[in-house]
Image: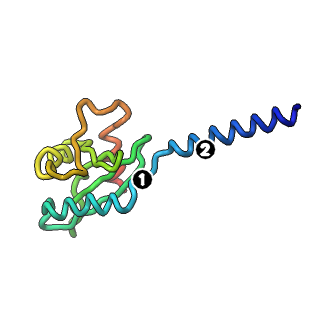
């Protein structure tokens, strides 16, 4: 009987760990990074430089930062929340693109304000600025 109880406890623990692992947030896949980079290139957002986009998990969110890369360095990043295969504007510069030049892009949306309380724009910008 004790063996059955022990096995049941182990099974429940493994189930809980598996469920938690499935809920873990991961960085946006490379195909998504390629998509947002192509959107920047198609709209000629940075005509005198090149666009670079990178993905990071910040807090419990998958975020993408994009910036202009030149010989003099890189610009302040545009921050995008990557959820459900969509890029959702986080900071003001990304929001401006989402509402303007990217407004016809099906993969880009504008996040409703106020942002969810777990999103810290300053921390996200800092994460992409410092590399």
Residue located at (65% from left, 40% from top):
15
- Whole-percent x, y for residue 35 in the image: 28, 60
Is residue 39 found left or right of 81 in the rendered image?
left
- Which residue is painted at 24% across and 42% down in the image? 91
Q: Mark 1, mark 2: which one is toward the viewer? A: 2
Residue bearing mark 1: 27
Badge 2 density bin: few <14, some 14–19, many ≥20, Cα 10 Å: few
| Mark 1 burial class by Cα count in 10 Å: few <14, some 14-19, many 20+ | some
Q: Position of residue 68 (x, y in %)?
A: 21, 61
Residue at the image point whose x is 21% and y is 57% from the top: 75
- Quarter of the C terminus within the rendering: bottom left
Residue at the image position 32 percent from the left and 52 percent from the top: 64
Q: Which mark is residue 54?
A: none
Task: Look at the numbered disc 1 and give the secondary structure of its residue.
Answer: loop
Say the numbered circle drawn on residue 18: 2
When asked about the image quadrant of residue 49, the answer is bottom left
**Left/right of residue 117 with respect to residue 95 in the rendered view:** right
Viewer-side residue, 71 vs 85: 85
Q: Position of residue 124 (x, y in %)?
A: 34, 45
Percent position of residue 62, x then y: 39, 47
Instruction: Please count the marks in the image.
Output: 2
Mark 1 or mark 2, earlier in chain: 2
Side of 26 relative to 55 (left or right): right
Please state, as top left, top right, bottom left or bottom right, where the N terminus lies in the image.
top right
Q: CA distance from mark 1 to mark 2?
A: 19 Å
């Amino acid at each position: 009987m004790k063996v059955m109880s022990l096995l049941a406890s182990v099974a429940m623990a493994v189930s809980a760990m598996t469920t938690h692992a499935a809920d873990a947030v991961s960085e946006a896949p490379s195909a998504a990074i390629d998509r947002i980079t192509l959107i920047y290139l198609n709209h000629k957002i940075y005509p005198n430089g090149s666009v670079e986009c990178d993905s990071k998990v910040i807090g419990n969110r998958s975020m993408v930062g994009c910036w202009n890369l030149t010989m003099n360095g890189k610009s302040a990043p545009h921050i995008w929340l990557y959820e459900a295969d969509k890029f959702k504007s986080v900071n003001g510069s990304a929001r401006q693109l989402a509402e303007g030049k990217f407004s016809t892009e099906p993969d880009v949306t504008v996040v409703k304000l106020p942002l969810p309380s777990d999103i810290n724009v300053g921390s996200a910008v800092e994460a992409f600025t410092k590399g």
